[in-house]
Amino acid sequence: MEKQIDKIMKLINFRYFLVVVLALTGLLQFSLMLGNVQGTTYNFKPLQLAPETVRSTKTIEDTVKTEQEKAKAALEVKPVYVFSDAIVGQRTAIVTSLFDYITTAQEEADTKEAQLKALKKKLASVDNKEIKIDLSDEQLTALLALDNKQLVHAKKEVVSFVKAALERPIRTERVASEQDAVESKIRARLPLNLAAQDAIVHIGRASIVETEILDKDQTNKLIEQARASVEPTRVLQGQIIVQEGQIINDDMYRQLELLGMTDNQRSLKPVAGLALFILLEMTFIYMLFEREPLTLRKKRNALLITMIIYAMSIVLMKLVSLIANDFDMLIFFVFPTALATMLVRMLVNERTAILITVLIAAAAGVIFQEGYSAVLQMEMALYIIFGGFASLFFMRTVEKRSHILTASGIVSLVNLVFIMFYLLMTQSNYGMKELLFYAVAAFASGFMSGTLAMGLLPFFESAFGVLSALRLIELSNPNHPLLKKLLVETPGTYHHSVMVANLAEAACEEIGADGLLARVGCYYHDVGKTVRPTFFIENQMAGMNPHDAMAPEKSAEIIMAHTTDGADLLRKHKMPQEIIDIALQHHGTSLLKFFWYKAKEEGKELDEADFRYPGPKPQTTEAAVISVADSVEAAVRSMKEPTPEKIRKLVQAIIDDRLKDDQFDECDISIKQLKTIEEVLCETLNGIFHSRIEYPEMK
């Protein structure tokens, strides 16, 4: 599988590869989750008998009902009227002025015609908005014919009638009745000729106006307050809209349409929402991997592993959701909450595991969403988050399979506590059967997470060549065929490899590199020496050295071949690429100085490149540390009476030589880290080659 992926990766850029993988995963997720967001619709018609009971799947405002209630509240508001005291004075003053005009006209002119003309002129100056005087010439003449005593009496009576009427609250609808009352009083109290009486009645009636005026601003304010005080009418989640066997009236059908539960009301909004949700999730994954500081191969494998686990979790959740309706209890509590988290944590890294846990939890909220939950089934989302995070906190180191089982037990306990929280918050009464089911579900979820993770781990390791901590632990077993071969055929090399492993592991852990990888890599780094064991000094017995009888260039060829021979053996045994790389890189392209100088001493003209290891140079921090530890261990072991000062000078010389030879140019290691490595190697070597007490001879 890995070879096919490598061919694809050579054809396209990683960023395009990332987009394609995320797009395919997103489409799969969209197709699986689409049915969870579309909801149920019904082919109902108004006035038909409902074949089943329908409940509201969400809480929504019934805007039509709300508006009807607001209109009803507005109609119940009583108008606000304001009584005007000033009207009494204004109207009585106008009546007084009109009678004064008549008297003045009588005094200013001698003839009836002149008096009539003068009176008309004065009445014309009266504002019709204040009082409308529309008297005929006959009526005006009749008024002018009255003597002063009659006019004074009439003025007094009319003013009295008008004042008495206007001092009481008069609204628009009562104006006419008050005018009639004033007219009745005038006709009863002023026995004048009909024309004069009609004219005075006209003045009296025209003087009566409304004294209580509608305050529109205050009334509108009260209406708005009344409308605002009306609570929105809501169709509640779970509320019965239509009862089975009931006739569907217009109001029921309107509510079904409002909820989008009729066949002609299927909305695309949830579909668009789901698309945005998945786009958001894929964007976070894109940002994570686009910025991941890994080699192309490791980044590619991490992406594929993560997305396969993510898609597998979505499929598994979908399957659980499909059978959930067949159970009276919440079957989704059986879902292995920490499965994806454990796998991604062991196969990729912790940061990716955290993100995937949150994204799967969010997806679970949609997939397990029931008809009466708002948008997300938060219980399931939180259940996965708590279970997944529990596994992260208790899987900081995974060196044994028992560690996974321990983490599974912790996850089970966290699941149980969360389910207890859920059951208590629902405030429902549960029988022993339900409680036992949920307890079993909590433990089943936790232990299924660990069991499935252990079962699936080898498949991912094999398919993608991933080197997990558990795989490294397995490879460090002395019973591995290659290690047994190394021990039996090259015991000196085996001992050397173990010593180098101790040095490299200590140095890697101090600088933050992978100590376990360094240790296991050291075990196998010289396995190529098993091809020609006697050509290496640590395996030579009785002082026999075959190089003494060989040309320097031939000796160099044999010695340098142990890196490629080792890589071939490792490939033959299907070892991880990281171990093969260490076997090839632990000498880099360094010069085999002993045979190079030997050839020069013999006066041979040879190319220096023929005495350099084929490499490549160390590509990783672990390979660089191993290259130093390998040379240091061999050099110190050959020293006579090693002391701390000698060891330090030797370690410094080897590191300086590697630096000057540019052996660290292709790996990510700093001068500061090299200083730390120097200190750790010196400290460890001093502990190994410490001075011993000289025991007295036994007699």
Image (cartoon, helix red, strand yellow):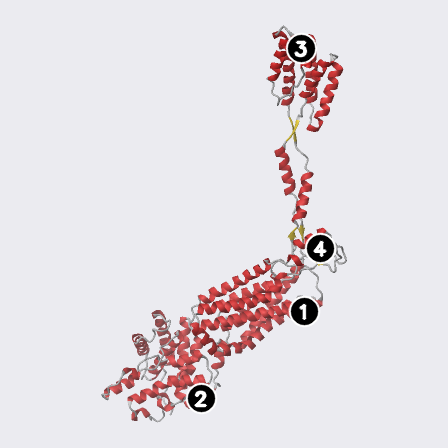
Asked if the residue under mark 3 is in contact with the one under mark 4, i.e. CB atoms within 8 Å, the reply is: no
Give the distance between the C-alpha atoms of the residues marked 3 and 2, in whole angstroms: 148 Å
Q: Give the label, 4 or 1, closer to the camera.
A: 4
Above or below — where is 148 with respect to 506? above
- The residue tagged 2 is 485
Q: Which of the two labelled residues, at mark 2 and mark 1, occupies the earlier sequence position?
A: 1
Identify the residue at horizontal 71%, vertical 27% (top origin).
Answer: 174
Question: For the residue labelled by badge 1, is the local secondary structure a helix, a strand or a loop?
Answer: helix
Give the distance between the C-alpha atoms of the residues marked 4 and 1, in whole angstroms: 33 Å
Give the distance between the C-alpha atoms of the residues marked 4 and 2, in whole angstroms: 78 Å
Above or below — where is 442 with respect to 53? below
Query: x, y (%) of residue 145?
Result: 68, 9
Q: Which of the two labelled residues, at mark 4 and mark 2, occupies the earlier sequence position?
A: 4
Mark 4 residue type: Ile
Query: x, y (%) of residue 481?
Result: 47, 87
- The residue tagged 3 is 144
Query: x, y (%) of residue 183?
Result: 73, 19
Above or below — where is 326 with respect to 93? below
- The residue tagged 4 is 241
Question: For the residue labelled by badge 3, is the local secondary structure a helix, a strand or a loop?
Answer: helix
In this rendered view, identify the residue nearer to me: 338 or 612: 612
- The residue tagged 1 is 437
Question: For the residue labelled by badge 4, is the local secondary structure a helix, a strand or a loop?
Answer: strand
Is residue 582 rendered to the left or right of residue 330? left
